[in-house]
Image (cartoon, rainbow, N blue to C red):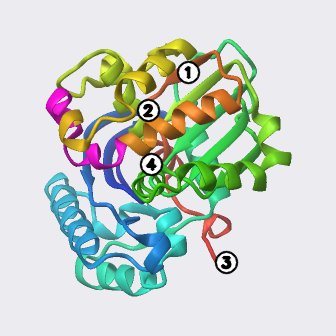
Amino acid sequence: MTNLRASIDIGSNSVLLLVGDISNGKLREISKRSEITSLGRDLDATKNFHSESMEATYQALESYAKECDHLGIQRTDIIATATEASRVAANASVFFAKVEHDLKIKVNIITSQAEAYFSSKGILNNGQFRSEIITIMDIGGASTELIRVNTKTFQVLETISMPIGAVRATQWLDEKLFVQRLQKVFLDFRNEIDKFQTKELYCVAGTVTSLGNMHLKNKEFIENEVHGLVLKAEDVDALFKTYSEFSPKETLELFPFLKKRTNSIRGGLHLVYHLAHRLMVKELTISTYGLRFGTLLEGEIKKQYLYGQ
């Protein structure tokens, strides 16, 4: 028995589509797409989605909807989720009401705990792990989730969501406020963050997969080369030392695959570097699976996962 499904992850930086065929509990990828739309742009200052970001997000969703039409997936069956930026933006509900009215895609704003659950479900899919308990880091545009999960029972043991991501970090760097803002986050979470110290950290989302390709000196994004790639702590240090002060233009010239992500990768690199040191990490294992895989495998968004419920 097969089941064709589509999931969309609307993040603070990117909008991701995954179409997969679920057969006997196994996922076979049919299509994956990614668009950088920067919904988290200027969010800390304005508390609203930027008009240009909303337009870019709408266009991405419209394109994804048409692909689902072509594949015979009903738009009302698309599993669409939105994360930190959408929890913060005052105009999120109005924007997503327009999306549902015009495109027939219902967007579910989920909690940070739901992010942890779905990201864990995605990364654990067909994975092989040396330890029964692992720690996962999911860096988004506006938030970062740290998750401890049991790989045998698939139970999320503990999670925290910190209000810092690649987009926010880049803005703080531009404003010369990164150090003091990061110190405040570490101070606010000082009692929780030590529980996630680990020698081996599993990392998902666009920042770390991009850094993996940068480490490999790839001009194009090569997914199968970074999925499962292990970066030593000294590899992360070398990336930071080499690229942390590069301008977006300089970075893009070296790594054309970054495209629009080049505007936020500097903040993402700073964040990975400082978090890896704070957590005393020796190895980072990169996974290209994540939230959209988890929601696709789950097949639905239960009420308990919805923000504000």
Amino acid carrying mark 1 in the image? Leu
- In the image, residue 52 lies in the stretch drawn in magenta: no
Amino acid carrying mark 2 in the image? Val
Residue 189 x/y as whole percent: 77, 51
Is the residue under label 2 in contact with that under label 3 (CB below 8 Å)? no
Task: Mark 4 or mark 1: name the one nearer the start of the chain.
Answer: 4
- In the image, residue 262 lies in the stretch drawn in magenta: yes
Q: Which numbered disc covers residue 166? A: 4
| Near-viewer residue (36 or 150) | 36
Tell me the element at label 1.
Answer: strand
Tell me the element at label 2.
Answer: helix
Q: Residues within 10 Å of mark 4 (few under 14, many from 20)?
A: many
Amino acid carrying mark 4 in the image? Ala
Residue at position x 59%, y 35% in the image? 274
Q: Which numbered disc covers residue 309? A: 3
Query: Left or right: where does residue 265 sit relative to residue 284?
Result: left
State which region is magenta.
252-265
Task: Mark 2 or mark 1: name the one nearer the start of the chain.
Answer: 2
Nearest to viewer (mark 3 / mark 1): 1
Q: Which numbered disc covers residue 137? A: none
Which residue is under mark 1?
Answer: 284
Query: Left or right: where does residue 179 sit relative to residue 268?
Result: right
Residue at position x 22%, y 49% in the image? 260
Task: Classify residue 148 by image quadrant.
Answer: top right
Residue at position x 77%, y 51% in the image? 187
